[in-house]
Image (cartoon, coloured by chain):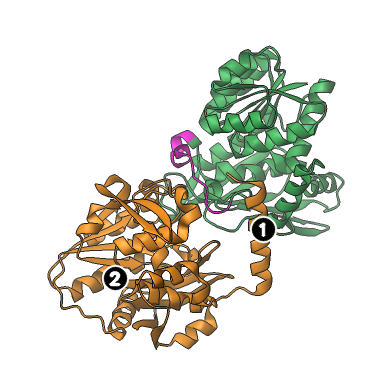
Chain colours: A green, B orange
Amino acid sequence: MNFGIIGLGNQGKLHLQNCLLRKELNVAAVADTSKHALEYATNRGVKRTYANYEDLLRDKNVDAVIINLPNYLHLESATKAAEAGKDILLEKPLASRLEDGEKIVSSVEKNDVKLMLGYSLRFESLFRELREKIVNGYFGEVEIAEATNISNGPFAGRADRIGPVPVPNWWFDKELVGGGALLDLGIHMVDLLAWYFGEVESVSSYLGYTFNMSAEDAATCIIKFKNGPLAVVNAGWFSIDHLISIGLNGTSRNFSAVFPPKKSRLRFIWNDFKSIVGRGASSSTAEELKYFVDCISRDVEPSPSAKEGLLDLRIISMAYEHASVLTQAKM
Amino acid sequence: MYFVSFVQAEDLSADGIRETIRKSISLIEFNSNKKVDKIVIKPNMCYYFHPSTGEVTDPRFVGALIDVLRMTFQSNPEISIVESDASAMKCHYVFKMLRYDALAREKDVRLVNLCEEKSKQVEMEIAGHSLKFNVPELLLDCDFLVNVPKIKYMHGVKVTCAMKNIFGCNAVQKKSVYHNTLNEAIVGLNKIMRTSLVVADGLVVNYKYTKRLNLVMASENVVAADAAASRLLGINPKSVKQLSLASRESLGELDFVPVGDFDYFKRNFPRKGMKENLFERGASAYLRLFHRS
């Protein structure tokens, strides 16, 4: 199977490394506007590089693409990829706006291609096992759920870098990003909860602006699932510490866990070392890729699908529409 | 030998911080008789961090300092708060995110991105390394440079306090070009842009963990201030390359006279142990080896 990778930022490079480790995959081409990024791919054996992703989409040798572009480019790139007949692995969120998400879904359906959203947490064993337990009634009826994803967001230092990383300008523009911490990090947790509990009945939220940016950097979103619990999603861009956690309170059992369980830097170094010596890292993004390839080979609809991504976007969009701003709240 | 004062703020109201800064400056017997027309304040705004993390200078601290400076120098000096774009940080965003833009409006001072100011190229040789800097004219023209650093640890230079803070006055965005000669560049820039007064914001410090220490540290000499910061971090100043180099270049001495409760802050500074230091050195060495970017 011949893959094309569009966008070689942090996430794009991670996908490239994962692709190169899979024997059944061939990275036929990559596209990025940065010469430095293209050199990175060439140095790793990628034969064809494009400065314009539309040229990559015209490449007949490419069967599927992984899109790692800024949110505001998701609509354009995903619809063009669908029109070119390529199957798509698109980094979350589906789009920066609900209307754009709807257009992507209809383009994917019209052109009969597969689109999977890059929600890597779905491929972590902890979250998969939890779903199985919920379905099997291990917790009884889950009445209250809580999911948190807090970090420095786009300002986070990367594990493979020493010191702070430059932040592209688009991250500071709410119009281009589509939202703040809730859309960027909260959507991972919204997706997990929607995967666990299904249809949503109502949504409300509170937004905070610690850093005085146009987009929120703190958010609490309360979701009532139609046939499920009352859930609270917390998301933040305000902390130099990174935390992902989940709590489930059921009629039979209560549960809470912090993810990842150990210090991420040590974990990163170990996984990274394994990938350097060619052993491959058992990361969630590697599992995600394996599953996507499998779906294409077996011609089945991948999940998280474009429609699931649209549902998540709808929840986030409702949360923004009905948000109260914390800084304005008065006792 | 220079005095370095260590004073604890009893409360963190504007009045409380102002009083602590005032006391800290008076303890070092700072002479305010000279006529000052142009003051430049250089806080640490290295990245988009919240002041409560201990990584950047708190704008409330700078606000209180401006009040103290206006009380000290009766000549109604023109005050500018300065920072410059860096490889990973842009002033345009950091001023707003850290709320320095609101502070500048409130205190009626200029807020300056040094990369957008006129600057002069200066070449100099430090320890056999030939270095080029873009020195802002604003810094060359000012009568009084107030250095408002944080007290931190950084791999490669060990102590980052007053001297490293001046590195941020070099009007070059891609500061990573100096990373192989960082110690020399820090010393060179401090030779060109002489700090008149160091007032370190130690309200919150971050080393092993983040701690509210409520410390205000002041000195008239950058080397003395950094040697004191080094002692707080539990590091012998003689082992800090930029400090020994600065001392050789006659910027100051590694010995200082502590005034105030130095021992209290030394005891209570959240220092790292050998285990944490070894792990971090190992991790950094690994990243440098396999991920040179």
User: Where does residue B189 sit, x and y in percent of width and height?
Assistant: 35, 59
Q: Residue at x 64, y 75 (%)?
A: B273
Badge number at residue B65: 2
Same chain under badges 2 and 1? The reply is yes
Instruction: Tell which of B293 and A80 is nearer to you.
Output: B293
Q: Which mark is residue B283?
A: 1
The range drawn in magenta is A162-176
Please say whether residue A194 is visible from this viewpoint: no
Image location of residue B21, percent across then percent down: 32, 77
Number of other residues with Cα within 10 Å of mark 1, as a class: few under 14, some 14 to 19, many 20 or more: some
Q: Tell whether B200 sits left or right of B122.
A: right
x, y percent for residue A6: 61, 26
Q: For this rendering, which residue is in front, B269 or B50?
A: B269
Above or below, A203 against A78 in this view is: below
In this view of the protein, can residue A234 be seen by the observer?
yes
Q: Secondary structure at mark 2?
A: helix
Instruction: Name the foreground residue: B75 vs A180.
Output: B75
